[in-house]
Image (spheres, rainbow, N blue to C red):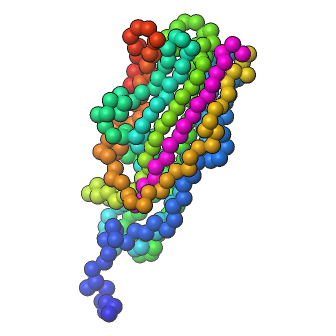
């Protein structure tokens, strides 16, 4: 039987009422592009990972504010640049590498814990009288520069011979109550980007690098059962601030080339 007077009806909580109407995710099918226009660095641009969700929030009866959006964490990172028989440079996340943490925030570094605050989030301020529909989207890709020469050398003689990259991420669609910090995980996505570039430093600029398999990336997975968000994925530092560039010579001790920013 319906309620005669709405004031007597216990309204559904936000947790019970929010509905995810649609979730789509993909990695673009185009291959990684390689740019050899610079005599100092090789640049490459990977295809984009994309996530898109439509969310319906029925009327919010009480005075509360919720933010709905994407949170992303890096779970694994291998990022090696080989320089013939000299050694390799390596971007590393020390705590993740050493198994001290399971994941590290991939926030934009400003709007923790969110990946960003433009298309990546929306905020609803209660009470509201009507249904609210939101579209929330994000994308991510890599566009780094790798020196042709050994990074700890004054010489710019091309020595770069191979690039290997393998990174895994978890991306969550989340609602957070701004007053209480109550956190609702609405959807969980896992994705991975793998990259192998072979380089012949003897060849002329513009003809050195070749993209090896995989040319097309594995598509992301939308998990049937949501995963909890590790604590480190919600707070500083993010991956960009925590990463360290190491030089690991074939002979001798490792050298920190670029220390962490935090």
Question: x%, y% of residue 217?
Answer: 59, 44
Q: Is residue 251 left or right of residue 147?
A: left
Q: Is residue 209 left or right of residue 110?
A: right
Q: Is residue 127 visible?
A: no
Picture layout, residue 28 above or below residue 186: above
Q: Is residue 197 magenta?
A: yes
Question: x%, y% of residue 257?
Answer: 44, 16
**Residue at the image point whose x is 32% and y is 93% from the top:** 1
Span colored in magenta: 186-203
Task: Assign the magenta stretch its main secondary structure.
Answer: strand
For the residue pair 98 and 16, the one nearer the viewer reads as 98
Question: x%, y% of residue 34?
Answer: 67, 30
**Residue at the image point whose x is 57% and y is 26% from the top:** 163
Question: x%, y% of residue 240?
Answer: 44, 32
Picture layout, residue 5 above or below residue 187: below
Picture layout, residue 184 above or below residue 203: below
Q: Is residue 59 magenta?
A: no
């Amino acid at each position: 039987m319906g309620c005669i007077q709405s004031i007597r009806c216990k309204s559904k909580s936000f947790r019970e009422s929010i509905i995810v109407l649609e979730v789509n995710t993909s990695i673009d099918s185009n291959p990684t592009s390689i740019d050899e226009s610079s005599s100092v660095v090789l640049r490459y641009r990977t295809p984009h990972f994309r996530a898109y969700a439509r969310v319906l929030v029925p009327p919010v009866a009480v005075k509360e504010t919720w933010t709905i959006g994407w949170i992303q964490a890096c779970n694994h990172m291998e990022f090696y640049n080989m320089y013939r028989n000299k050694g390799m440079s390596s971007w590393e996340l020390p705590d993740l590498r050493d198994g001290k943490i399971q994941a590290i925030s991939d926030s934009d570094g400003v709007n923790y814990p969110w990946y960003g605050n433009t298309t990546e989030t929306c905020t609803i301020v209660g009470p509201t009288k009507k249904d609210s529909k939101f579209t929330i989207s994000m994308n991510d890709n890599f566009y780094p520069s790798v020196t042709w020469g050994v990074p700890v050398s004054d010489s710019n003689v091309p020595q770069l011979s191979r690039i290997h990259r393998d990174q895994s991420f978890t991306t969550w669609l989340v609602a957070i109550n701004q007053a209480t910090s109550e956190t609702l995980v609405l959807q969980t996505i896992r994705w991975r980007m793998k990259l192998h570039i072979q380089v012949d430093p003897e060849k002329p600029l513009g003809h050195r690098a070749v993209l090896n398999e995989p040319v097309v990336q594995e598509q992301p997975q939308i998990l049937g059962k949501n995963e909890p968000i590790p604590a480190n994925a919600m707070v500083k530092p993010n991956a960009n601030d925590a990463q360290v560039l190491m030089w690991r010579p074939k002979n001798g001790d490792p050298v920190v080339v670029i220390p962490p920013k935090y």
